Image (cartoon, grey):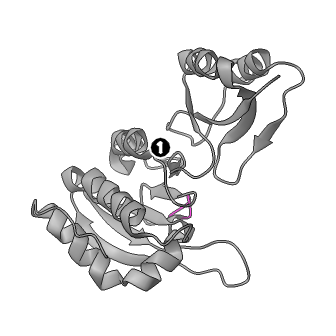
Amino acid sequence: MGETVKIAISPAIQLGGSLFTPNQLAEIGHVLGADAKVEVTPFKQLYAEVALEQRDAVKEKLEQIGLDVNPAGFVTKSLIACNFCKGAEEAGLETAVALNEAIAGIATPTPLKIGYAGCALGTSEPLIKDIGVVKMRDKFDIYVGGEPKGLKTSFAKLLRSGVTEKQLIPTVIALIDFYKENAKGKEKFGKFVDRISLDRLKDMTLMGKEGGGHETID
């Protein structure tokens, strides 16, 4: 098979949650081949290894049937979204789709998981994600630093409340960029938040809100 690369396959962000159609599953099997091994991940993606020279063709075929294909490994995962049980408009489906398009596949020091909940029920468990977004009526709350693994599970802390739809994606991107620029090696995002401090991250995102960019730590 030669050199291989791992890809991450996700269904579109949609009403009802992470839903694959029978046709999509059949096409995944057809495109990858009978001998392929497909891993189901905790962050609602399918991992598969493909030949490096076939990666672009596989990506194109899977995207043609409505699937998202991104790099695997040390990147921002596809948005882990809720089921939008309150409906597309009230739960912010369009916003979630736009957020996913903005963040999925960005190279990061360690794998980064971002959760989105369309209401305070939080069925996508945003408070145990690296970054969690919760829609509260017509605004959004952003949480940072959740950790679901190990014996010392920790909940994310509230970073910003009352974030507008216009501010949401720039704020999340600013957090990702700041993490990429200032993490120590393969420092996990939760430990990064603890080291930098919530107040400093809050100041950084507020600087971005006012158009002043964000600082880099020496």
Residue drawn at (73%, 27%) of the image: 50
Nearer to us in this view, 190 or 217: 217
Q: Is residue 103 left or right of residue 58?
A: left
In the image, residue 179 above or below residue 218: above
Magenta residues: mostly which secondary structure? loop
Residue 180 percent location from the top left of the image: 41, 61
Residue 140 percent location from the top left of the image: 30, 62
Queried whether the magenta region covers residue 173, the answer comes back as no
Residue 61 percent location from the top left of the image: 61, 14
* Residue 156 in view of the camera: no
- Quarter of the figure with residue 29: top right
Residue 4 percent location from the top left of the image: 74, 31
Nearer to us in this view, 173 or 51: 51
The segment highlighted magenta reads: 121-125
Nearer to us in this view, 98 or 60: 60
Q: Secondary structure at mark 1?
A: loop
In the image, residue 9 above or below residue 126: above
Q: Is residue 188 left or right of residue 30?
A: left
Q: Badge 1: few (under 14), some or many (20 or more) residues near its Cα, within 10 Å?
A: many
Residue drawn at (29%, 59%) of the image: 174
Tally the numbered discs: 1
Residue drawn at (75%, 29%) of the image: 3
List the single residue furthest toward the right. 35
Amino acid at the residue labelled 1: Ala
Q: Mark 1 highlights which residue?
A: 104
Residue drawn at (29%, 72%) of the image: 160
The quarter of the rendered structure image containing the C terminus is bottom left
- Quarter of the figure with residue 200: bottom left
The quarter of the rendered structure image containing the N terminus is top right
* Residue 1 in view of the camera: yes
